[in-house]
Amino acid sequence: MIYKTAKGITMPALGLGTFELTGPEGIAAIRSAIEHGYRHIDTAVRYGNEAEVGQAIREAGVPREDLFVTTKVWFDSLAPDQVRQSMADSLDRLQMDYVDLFLVHWPGREVPMCDTLAAFTEARDTGRTRSIGVSNFTVPLLAEAIDTCGAELVNNQIEYHPLLAQKKLLASARARDMIVTAYQPIARGAVFKEPEIVKIGETHGKSAAQVALRWLVQQDNVAAIPRSSRIENIKANFDIFDFELSEAEMATISGLDRQERKSDFEWAPEWDAA
Ligand SMILES: NC(=O)c1ccc[n+]([C@@H]2O[C@H](COP(=O)([O-])OP(=O)(O)OC[C@H]3O[C@@H](n4cnc5c(N)ncnc54)[C@H](OP(=O)(O)O)[C@@H]3O)[C@@H](O)[C@H]2O)c1
């Protein structure tokens, strides 16, 4: 495993995304991932599966302190009292005393950002989370959160894969000692249709998904959270630590950028220009 550290908080560079992993099949998939070696699990109130995540972790029998668990508050609950309630409800469902990372899932428009982030800081200071961060924040939103509100953010979780470069956000995260967690890291499977990635994989005996994941975790300050419901894919996505991409291969993959975004919604912020 490769680890990433920001502001003294260390996370495994590869985690399991759990969107749509619900019910008994979801529990089985998450438990299998932990049994296979995953120690970083990403959930959210919005995924409706925090209870499943908690159950899978208990069934896997791995000590809590060996795991890195992230959850997120939905953007309809960003007033300070709602943040406190959301955090309490998440911990109840997870049956945990704390999470490792607590994120604003999407920036809001109604509640002043500094009020929301003050409640996040309080959750950290009272031990409900070891660290705080955001998701889907742009460079100007990060500046507001850190420079205006003074929030000590360790993480920005954003869509990032070979078809969507994030140069500005990466530079900003590195300058601010933050980790970027890449969501949709295999572009929901689109990397399999990229001949250059497939070809690079062939030289290493790896799939396009494995190449895309390796390309991400090999970059400074970058972690990735692929999701799969199939144990063979969950295992394959973890099998990326026995090979290395050359600088030329890294550059070839970076050159595939088409600003192809998979997650764009009416509540999204105005994205940074490429
Ligand atoms: N913060 C946010 O706003 C946000 C937004 C979106 C996602 N996320 C997080 O990021 C995680 C990942 O994103 P995602 O699930 O949308 O996209 P993804 O991880 O890029 O792709 C998931 C898709 O790829 C398939 N897949 C996974 N591994 C594979 C492999 N080795 N070979 C072939 N197919 C494979 C899966 O199908 P199978 O199940 O059939 O393997 C699934 O259909 C989510 O689960 C969630 O935790 C966060």
Image (cartoon, helix red, strand yellow):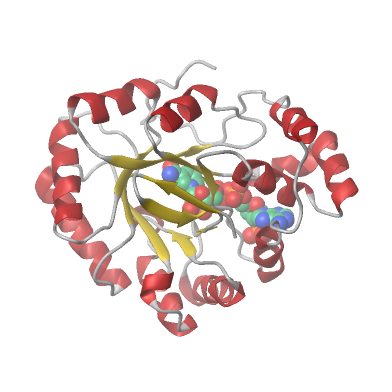
Q: Which residue is at a point 37% across and 72% down the rendered structure image?
A: 65
How far from the left and from the top, in percent, is residue 39? 50, 66
Farthest residue to the top: give it.
273
Residue 115 can be seen in this image: yes
Placement of the C terminus among the 4 image quadrants:
top right
Q: Nearer the viewer, residue 262 or 55?
A: 55
In-image side of 98 versus 139 (left or right): left
| Residue sticking out furthest to the front | 8
> Residue 190's x, y, as percent?
71, 40
- Residue at the location (57% across, 71% down)? 29
Q: In this view, does 269 lie above or below 205?
A: above
Figure quadrant of the N terminus:
bottom right
Q: Which of 254 and 115 is in front in this view?
A: 254
Q: Measuring 63% from the left and 45% from the top, which residue is drawn there?
A: 188
Name which quarter of the figure residue 144 lies in.
top left
The front one of 178 and 199 is: 178
Residue 144 drawn above or below residue 180: above
Q: Where is residue 93 in the image (x, y as percent from the top left)?
A: 29, 70
Residue at horizontal 27%, vertical 63%? Answer: 90
- State whether residue 111 appears in this view: no
Tell which of 213 and 12 is nearer to you: 12
